[in-house]
Amino acid sequence: MKPNTLHAVFTTEHSIALGGHFYSTSNIQDSFFAIVHCFMGNFLVTNVEHCRTRILLLRMMQYFYKCLVSGVNPEGRLSVVLPGHQSDHFLAEYSNGHIPNMLENDSLIDALTLCNFCILANVLDFRTYSFPTLDDHEAPSPREYDQRAKWDYNALSVVDREHFTYTRGLARNFISWIGCNYDVTYGQATEPVVDFERHFAGRYLHQQCCAILNYKEKATGEGLSGLRFCKASDVERQMDLLFGEEQWACYGDWAQTKLDASMHGSLAFGDRAFTIKRKEKPLQFKGRLSLSHPLLPTDKRAEFEPTKLGKTRGDKLYSSGTRNGFLSSKSNRRPLRGEESSESDTSSPSESESSEV
C-alpha cells in the first residue's frame, strides 16, 4: 500500500494485526505529504507517531549523497571498483536500482522532495514544539515558554538535533551538486534555468513551506488542534529561524515569499513541463566529495562542511542556551563574580537541571 493512504484493519474475530513500514524512493513525495498531514492532524489521522522512522529518511539522504556525489560519477557508473571479494558487496549496495535517475523529471522531484524534508526535519518534528520534562496532562510554565523564545528550547535531544543539522547540510550540498552537473529547461524556453538553487530547488522549497503555513492556518481556523503547544505562529517562527541566516539567501527571500503564503495550497511540485540534461561543462562543485570508506581514496579538494552548512539560527540559539544553562530571563542570569543571588527562585539552574536539559 502506498504511503499517504487512509486505511484501517477489519477482522471477523478478535485478532492481533502485525504490520510494517518502509520508505521507497519512487513514493517519497507521498511519504512527505503524509508526514505533513500527520503533523497537522496528529492523532486524528494516525494512531501512532513514527518519529524514529524519520531517521531512515535522513539515512536515505546520506545514501543518495554517497552514491551520486561520492561513490559514482554523473553517468551512474562506479568511479572506483574495490579489489577482491568485497567488490560484489559494494556493487550491490550502490546499484542504480536504489537511487533516483537524475535525468527523469519525477526522479529529480523525488530527490528534491527528500532534500526538502531533510531541510525541514526539525520544523515537522512534534518534539520541536514540546518540552522535555512535561507529561501529557501538564502545561508549560512561563519560564519554559521564555526559554523556547530565547533559546529554541524543546524536547529534541542533542543527538537528534545534530543529526538534523548534518543531514540538512548534506541536502544543501546535494542540491548544489545537481545544479553543477545538470541543466533544467522549462517548457519551450531555449535557455536552461540560470540559478538552479534559487529558481528551481529554492522555489520548490519555499512553495512547500508556504503551503505548510497555509495548511496550519486553515487547520487552526477549522478547529483542528493538531499538536499541543504548536500554533501557526510557532511553525512560522521555526521557518524564520531556518531561513534567518545569510547563507540561506541562495534559495530566495523567505521574508518576502511568506507574505504570499495563502496563494500556495498544494505541497505538490506543480508544473512538470521541463527537461533535464547533463551539463556539457559541469561547474565546479565546492561541497564534500569524499566517500567515508577505508578502501577508497580521500578527496583533498575544498569542501563545505555539512554540519556548518546545515546550521540554522535556531541551532545557534540552542547551542548558546546549552552553554548558558538555558537561563530564561535577565533576572535569572547566573550571578557575576562578587554578586549574590537574592532569592532562590531567581537563581540559575542547578547542575542536575543543566545536564538534564
Image (tube, rainbow, N blue to C red):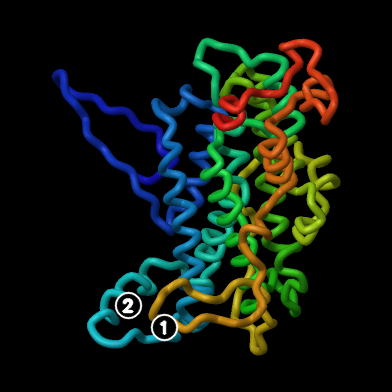
Q: Is residue 264 visible?
A: no
Task: Tell me: residue 5, above or below residue 338.
Answer: below
Whether residues under marks 1 and 2 lie with C-beta atoms below 8 angstroms apart, the answer is: yes
Say which amino acid is labelled 1: Leu
Disc with the residue nearer the chain's start (1 vs 2): 1
According to the picture, the residue beneath numbered tag 1 turns out to be 78
Decide which of 167, 23 is in the foreground and name it.
167
Furthest residue to the left?
13
Query: How many neighbours does mark 2 have within 10 angstroms: few (below 14), some (14-19), or many (20 or more)?
Result: some
Task: Name the residue at 64% across, 89% down.
Answer: 280
Say which amino acid is labelled 2: Leu
SS for callout 2? helix
**Side of 87 relative to 180 (left or right):** left
Q: Which quadrant would residue 341 be assigned to in this image?
A: top right
Residue 196 x/y as whole percent = 71, 68
Task: Tell me: residue 262, above or below residue 87.
Answer: above
Q: CA distance from mark 1 to mark 2?
A: 8 Å
Residue 257 x/y as whole percent = 81, 47
Task: Name the residue at 62% across, 79% down.
Answer: 181
Task: Name the residue at 83% across, 40% down.
Answer: 259
Residue 41 x/y as whole percent = 53, 26
Furthest residue to the front?
338
According to the picture, the residue beneath numbered tag 2 turns out to be 91
